[in-house]
Image: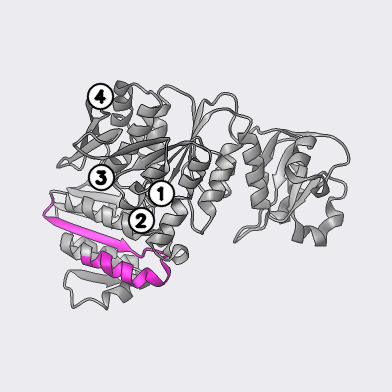
Amino acid sequence: MTNSAAFTSNELIAIFGENNCFFPKDFVTQSVETDTRLMKPNSIFIAIKGEQHDSHNFIDKAIDNGANCIIVDSVWYENNVDNLKNYNHIVVKNTINALGKLANFHRSRFNIDIIAVAGSNGKTTTKELIAKILSSEKNILKTHKNFNNQIGVPLMLLRLDETYQMAVIEIGTNEPGEIYLLSEIVAPTAGVITNIGKEHLEGFIDLDGVESEETSLFAYLKKSDSIAFLNMDDDRLKKYLPLFDNVFTYGKNTNGEYNLNATIEINNDLTSKLTLNNQTETFEVNLKVKGLNYAYNAIPAVAVGLFYKIPIPTIIQSLESFAPDCDQDYGRMVVFQKNGVTILNDTYNANPSSTALALETLSLTQSDNKIAVLGDMLELGDSAIKEHKEILDKAKSIANFVLLYGPTYREALTMLKEEDKITHFDNKQELLNHLHIILSDDTALLVKGSRGMKMEEIVKQLVQ
């Protein structure tokens, strides 16, 4: 994730203020780095203090590896002022914010369209689908994997150079105010909010809190008179329609009242056919990827493609050739067969909304033996037990067997009446042993859980 974002000493003074910059003489930097292992000669090194590591401990190594300017935290600087007196350095209250300021300044150098993608679920997939469509005609910078936070987003923007014609940047949140902060850094010319769902309730409390946070992107788009792609299927999003003059509406509709109208048909193999109408032409997309989530995420991707004048045949070809990233053991609804068992690997992450959607996908399988293996959904705060119980109620109505892992599901299970089909396990090996007993040739198996639960370990061992 290196970059070639260059800054002069005068530009750095303009960004951070003369009183915060300590430069013996004028100089020019050639890149911005947060990792000493990626240092190039004449780089800016930003010392970031994380939950586990403090990059201030690696300043000497950064200088040895070629850094010609160091950005440090003011608290650290008070105790280490003499260590940097012979080097170019900048002192700030928050080095993560400093990274964002550099990225925003660099972004302002490029007069290109940037689409920001936010939302509770499906951000990464939607970003990938949009980039797939747009890259058919333009050179696109897109967010790497899920680099969507206050460190990842700036690092992506710093990769901008003259070769890129557009960018698709994913922005995520786990605390109030983060979406608007990232919007200010990105300065998008367009934005998509995939949906409003139950995410990070530990910080946002309820759906009202999630809505307030996610729609901060709309606030930025309104202020900058940028285009908003509006999901009319989401009751909490569609009410913002009167806010915008510059809007492109999309949703499941047969009356042709949106800018993009769609219907979805799910096939027996969990692939889907989208029938789409842009008020002048009707066309079909037959997705090769499996799962309801891809069908839903493809609709805003088509909306973006149409707005930016990508030809319809190119949009169709781009979506029909799309394949998910399977580099990791965890997956975003990666569906495959193994010895007669259909495995739905959706272990990348989980919240109540995405888990409910995954269970709906399981319900659409043709298998007589449906099994849901569920790991705890994290970061739900005081709502955790209630949300886990609601998922159990849904799961038992769909699956023949529900196997649980994690202390929150254990507690939620005690709130249900005796359930023969639901079993909790204290370790994954016991769960796997039981799973082997109930598997049959005609089984559809969903595995889902939050990132911290590492439910992909179950998929990996099962496949082996």
Q: Residue at x 64, y 51 (%)?
A: 96
Circle 2 packing at 10 Å, graded few (<14), some (14-19), many (20+), is: many
- The residue wearing badge 1 is 119
User: From which residue to which does the magenta span run?
Assistant: 367-393
Q: Picture quarter containing residue 27?
A: top right
Between tags 4 and 1, which lies in front? 4
| Residue type pointed to by label 2 | Gly
- The residue wearing badge 3 is 291
Mark 2 vs mark 3: which is more N-terminal? 2
- The residue wearing badge 2 is 197
Q: CA distance from mark 2 to mark 3?
A: 18 Å
Q: Give 253 or 74, whichever is nearer the viewer.
A: 253
Residue 126: x percent and y percent? 38, 40
Callout 2 secondary element: loop
Asked if marks 2 and 1 touch (Cβ < 8 Å), the reply is: yes
Q: CA distance from mark 3 to mark 4?
A: 28 Å
Circle 3 packing at 10 Å, graded few (<14), some (14-19), many (20+), is: many
Specify whether residue 253 is painted magenta: no
- Would residue 36 appear left or right of 189 to someone viewing this image? right
| Residue type pointed to by label 1 | Gly
Q: CA distance from mark 2 to mark 1?
A: 8 Å
| Residue type pointed to by label 3 | Gly
Q: Quadrant of the N terminus?
A: top right
Q: CA distance from mark 3 to mark 1?
A: 19 Å
Q: Residue at x 17, y 69 (%)?
A: 421
Mark 2 vs mark 1: which is more N-terminal? 1
Circle 1 packing at 10 Å, graded few (<14), some (14-19), many (20+), is: many
Callout 3 secondary element: loop
Callout 1 secondary element: loop
Q: CA distance from mark 2 to mark 4?
A: 32 Å
Marker disc for residue 280: 4
